[in-house]
Amino acid sequence: MAQDKQNEAKIASMDENKENVSDPGVGLEILQIIKDSQQQHGLRHGDYQRYRGYCSRRLRRLRKTLGFKMGNRHKYTGKKITEEMLSDSRYLLLVLMEAERSWSYAMQLKQEANTEPRKRFHLMSRLRKAAKHGQKLEKLCESPSIDAKTKLEAQAYTAYLTGMVEFELQEWKPAMEAFNKCKTIYEKLASAFTEELAVLYHQRVEEISPNIRYCAYNIGDQNAINDLMQMRLIGGGGNMMAEKLEALITQTRAKQAATMSEVEWRGRTLPVKIDKARIFLLGLADNEAAIAQASNEDTKEHLYETLLSECRDTIQAVREELKAEKQRERGPDADTGKVSNLQFLHSYLSYIKLCTVVKRNESMAHTLQAKLKDPHNDENKRGPKPQDLIRLYEIILQSLAELSTLQGLEEDHTFQKEMALKTLVYKAYRCFFIAQSYVLVKKWSEALVLYERVLKYAKEVQSKAKSIGDKELPDVQELIAEVNAEKYSLQAAAILGRLHRRTGLSFSCHPFFTVFPQPLCDRLETFRLDPALVGKQPNLVHFPPGFQPIPCKPLFFDLALNHVAFPPLDDKVEQKGKGGLTGYIKGIFGFGS
């Protein structure tokens, strides 16, 4: 709130300065103001309700500052902004905030309309109102007192809002014309300014490009689907557009699925009559190609999750159809022992799902393994540990075990041999990282036994791989070389450990260096190479320091007081008179005085 007041004060001071130097026009950084406000007030996290509340509060502050109130609390009195008021750019900002408030409310309703379709009518009303405020802003900016840059930005902003209205109405041609107009203006503005200012305009162009291609596809441009697929890979267009892209891809595959009737797998041709299965199998190759082309691990992980989600939905549809088929065929001779086509299709889809899980976890394991070997890991952050990789390989082995039990493949000996061989490979990798975890806790003998087990698995894989010839089988030669190197390091670490128990010196492994138990202050006369001194925990002095005896403060006791004889004070003590009734009477009458 304080920052907004400062911004409004800056705008007012700029207007005053422009009047003093007779500047040719009043200006307003429309796109810059919009983007800054959106990023600071909710849209970074997609919170349109928060941004709408911000717009309302800022409108109230602007009206109060400008004295442009719409009546009072009892009665509404409408006011219009005229060209005479445009000497102060805050009046333009007032119209801009009204448009942004309506637009943010429309986007909020768009999110809620997924579960409450009736809100779509209110959405269109708010979006039309935002476009109306945008047209009002553009008309005000036609005044000769407004500079050329503000006029162009107002036209682009109005074209964007108009395009959004037509886009939601699925009027593709008018929407495409409006978005193209907006894109052209921002491209011209970007070319007219420095790179720092042009970045904002280029970002806006990238935001509306998916909308233009989507409109082009719906108009009839079939080549636009390829551009949309590429945008899906790089995550362009934002969350709102991503949903439309997914729906468009599904719709395109549904059109192609009409021509697909069967699929071949493991030497058996399967008829595919379920539409959901057809759509999934048609898009399988595209999904796998997208994963192979993914530029980073986050995108690849997202694509894997999307593929797995589609596969689960397809398996569920086939499973329901399988239950219905069993109920129809229930009878005395229903169980013939032969796997039906629908059951074999279910096994094929389960095979795809489990293989995808294996590939995803293998990709994650390679990423973690690279981070584990990276010597520049930040020690303040928790880095990957061998236990993380062990968990991933356990999931892979569990998936391979499920693959071996798929219905219809029990008698396929080639398939069973492939699964057994892959199981050996991943057992070797799991065993290797278990050994690594033992190395970290300096259990040398256990780690050495596990390394021997890894070599046993790897040599068994090499001997059996020649007969099967599986191209997807991971190469274990690199693993064997790494295990041999680790074994030598392990044997040296074990020898140094025994030396430590004899001499009292402490040694660590990876890399080898001597860690002296004495701090540096106790061995200044002896030179020893100790790399720990330049680490984050150098052993320089004893800390905390040990206790040492020190002289105490003496205690004084007054012993002479017991031997001092004080002088008698009897003569100075006042003698009291005798008491009784006689003394009392004498005192009353004064006889005793």
Image (tube, helix red, strand yellow):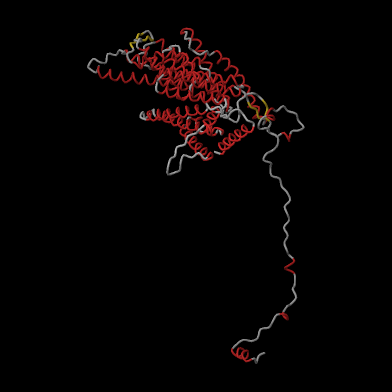
Q: How many marks?
A: 0
Report the quarter where the C terminus lies: bottom right
User: Quarter of the image holding residue 87?
Assistant: top right
Q: Position of residue 392 (x, y in %)?
A: 49, 23
The relative height of residue 369 versus residue 461 in the rendered view (above or below) is: below
Looking at the image, can residue 75 be seen? yes
Q: Position of residue 523 (x, y in %)?
A: 74, 33
Q: Would you say 324 lies left or right of 454 here?
A: left
The relative height of residue 422 versus residue 581 in the rendered view (above or below) is: above
Q: Would you say 118 lies left or right of 471 here?
A: left
Looking at the image, can residue 430 be seen? no
Depth check, front residue: 326 or 261:
261
Residue at the limit of the structure toward the right, as seen here: 525
Residue at horizontal 51%, vertical 36%? 58
Q: Position of residue 386 (x, y in %)?
A: 54, 24
Report the quarter where the N terminus lies: top right
Residue at horizontal 44%, vertical 44%? 73
Q: Would you say 435 lies left or right of 129 here?
A: right
Q: Position of residue 360 (x, y in %)?
A: 47, 19
Depth check, front residue: 534 or 130:
130
The relative height of residue 362 versus residue 470 in the rendered view (above or below) is: below
Depth check, front residue: 267 or 255:
255
Residue at horizontal 55%, vertical 12%? 477
